[in-house]
Image (tube, helix red, strand yellow):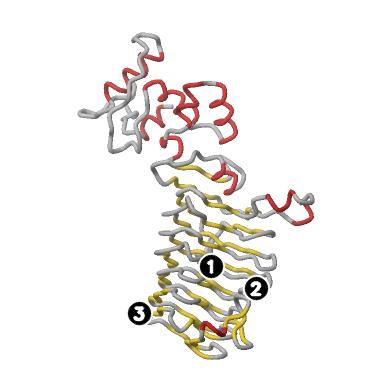
């Protein structure tokens, strides 16, 4: 418990007991909370003053339950919140959700995000161990119509910062794998999320490694691969604005390395490698916008970039487009579009 007090700005290193720093706004607050727990003060529900080191204030009756719940996994936290009104109030405190660890707090990333409260005022950091996490649902485990309603892959509908673990040599040691549905979906509610240092794999037909349906999302050092037919490495939908794909590797997908749906963007591909994909490296539909900064688009089976006539393509720095079978940048007419992907006998 003393170590958790240290997390909110208290000096717990003194051998004579923990000492409160001079000038700290928490001095009277913590003393009052401890006295309240001992029954030494009148039981009033006071709100703590705002302290820069604490994301959001806790009521005095919430401090000790929050400190206890901080040691528990998410299932036990939920059980305690149902059994105790003070714990139920503490459940919604950002103090509890400043950082989580998968699989320590929960077995999967999707389950961890599902159990977080909605509308937290801070971005929760979720650290992941170097393991393979099977986030999808295999088709043979479904039961009739229930399969249609199951969440497949990771659904990010809250603002989170997912940090994986890199293996020796710099490759991602954390792998998110889906055998049914998109492996990672960032949907409305997940605006401002960051995903870094993970490998993402999708294996099912027409399923994508990462699909982005929300704005201000950053992918950093993400290795994305979609091996199912028509699979896209990073699919950016029209709701997604100001997306950054930084130092990522989008490779060996059966479809495009990345595809921008109608009106998506701007999307910035910064120092990213988009290689050996079954269609073009990046496919851009009408009214999309993409910036390529020091990016590498090489060895793709069609073009480096297949873009609509009105798509905005900007290349900066040492962007490389070599070894693409059909050429570098290909412009097609919107009237040539047929069934979403097929264009004049070719896929974009």
Instruction: Look at 63% across and 76% down and name the residue there.
Output: 339
Res 230 label:
2
Q: Residue at x 45, y 84 (%)?
A: 309
Report the disc number at residue 316: 3
In which quadrant of the rendered image does the C terminus lie? Answer: bottom right
163 or 237: nearer the eye?
A: 237
- Graded by Cα atoms within 10 Å as few (under 14), some (14 to 19) or many (20 or more), the crowding at tag 1 reads many
Q: Earlier in the sequence, mark 3 or mark 2?
A: 2
Tell us which disc is closer to us: 3 or 2.
2
Q: Earlier in the sequence, mark 3 or mark 1?
A: 1
The x, y position of residue 346, in whole percent, is 62, 86
Q: Secondary structure at mark 1?
A: strand
Secondary structure of the residue carrying numbered label 2: loop
Label 3, residues with CA under 10 Å away: few <14, some 14-19, many ≥20: few
Q: Residue furthest left?
A: 23
* Mark 2 crowdedness (10 Å alpha carbons): few <14, some 14-19, many ≥20: many
- In-front residue for pair 328/250: 328
Quadrant containing the N terminus is top left
* Corner quadrant of residue 300: bottom right
Measure how far apart labels 3 and 1 are at the Cα level: 21 Å
Which disc is residue 234 wearing? 1
Q: Is residue 334 shown above or below 214?
A: below
95 shown above or below 29: below
Disc 3, disc 2: CB below 8 Å?
Answer: no
Q: Is residue 49 above or below residue 314?
A: above
Residue at horizontal 50 percent and vertical 83 percent from the top = 304
Q: Nearer the viewer, residue 148 or 151?
A: 148
Quadrant of the image occupied by residue 176: bottom right
Q: Label 2 to label 1, Cα distance in Å?
A: 12 Å
Q: Position of residue 48 (x, y in %)?
A: 31, 26
């Amino acid at each position: 418990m003393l170590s958790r007090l240290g997390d909110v700005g208290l000096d717990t290193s003194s051998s004579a007991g923990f000492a409160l720093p001079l000038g700290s706004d928490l001095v009277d607050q913590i003393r009052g909370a401890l006295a309240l727990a001992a029954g030494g003060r009148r039981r009033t529900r006071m709100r703590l003053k705002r302290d820069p080191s604490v994301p959001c204030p806790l009521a005095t009756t919430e401090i000790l339950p929050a400190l206890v719940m901080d040691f528990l996994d998410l299932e036990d936290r939920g059980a305690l919140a149902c059994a105790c009104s003070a714990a139920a109030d503490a459940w919604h405190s950002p103090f509890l959700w400043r950082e989580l660890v998968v699989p320590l707090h929960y077995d999967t990333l999707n389950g961890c995000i599902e159990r977080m409260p909605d509308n937290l005022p801070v971005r929760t950091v979720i650290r992941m161990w170097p393991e393979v996490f099977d986030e999808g649902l295999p088709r043979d485990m479904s039961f009739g119509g229930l399969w249609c309603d199951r969440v497949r892959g990771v659904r990010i509908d809250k603002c989170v910062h997912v940090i994986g673990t890199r293996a020796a040599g710099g490759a991602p040691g954390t792998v998110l794998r889906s055998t049914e549905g998109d492996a990672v979906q960032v949907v409305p509610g997940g605006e401002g999320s960051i995903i870094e240092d993970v490998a993402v794999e999708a294996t099912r037909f027409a399923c994508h490694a990462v699909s982005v349906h929300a704005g201000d999302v950053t992918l950093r050092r993400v290795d994305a691969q979609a091996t199912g037919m028509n699979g896209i490495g990073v699919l950016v939908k029209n709701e997604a604005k100001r997306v950054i794909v930084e130092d990522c590797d989008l490779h060996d997908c059966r479809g495009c390395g990345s595809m921008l749906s109608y009106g998506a963007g701007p999307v910035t591909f910064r120092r990213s490698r988009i290689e050996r994909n079954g269609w073009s490296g990046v496919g851009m539909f009408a009214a999309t916008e993409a910036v390529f900064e020091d990016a590498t688009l090489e060895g793709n089976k069609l073009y480096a970039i297949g873009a609509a006539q009105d798509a905005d393509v900007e290349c900066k720095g040492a962007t490389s487009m070599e070894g693409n079978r059909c050429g570098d940048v290909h412009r097609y007419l919107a009237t040539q579009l047929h069934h979403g992907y097929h264009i004049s006998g070719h896929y974009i």
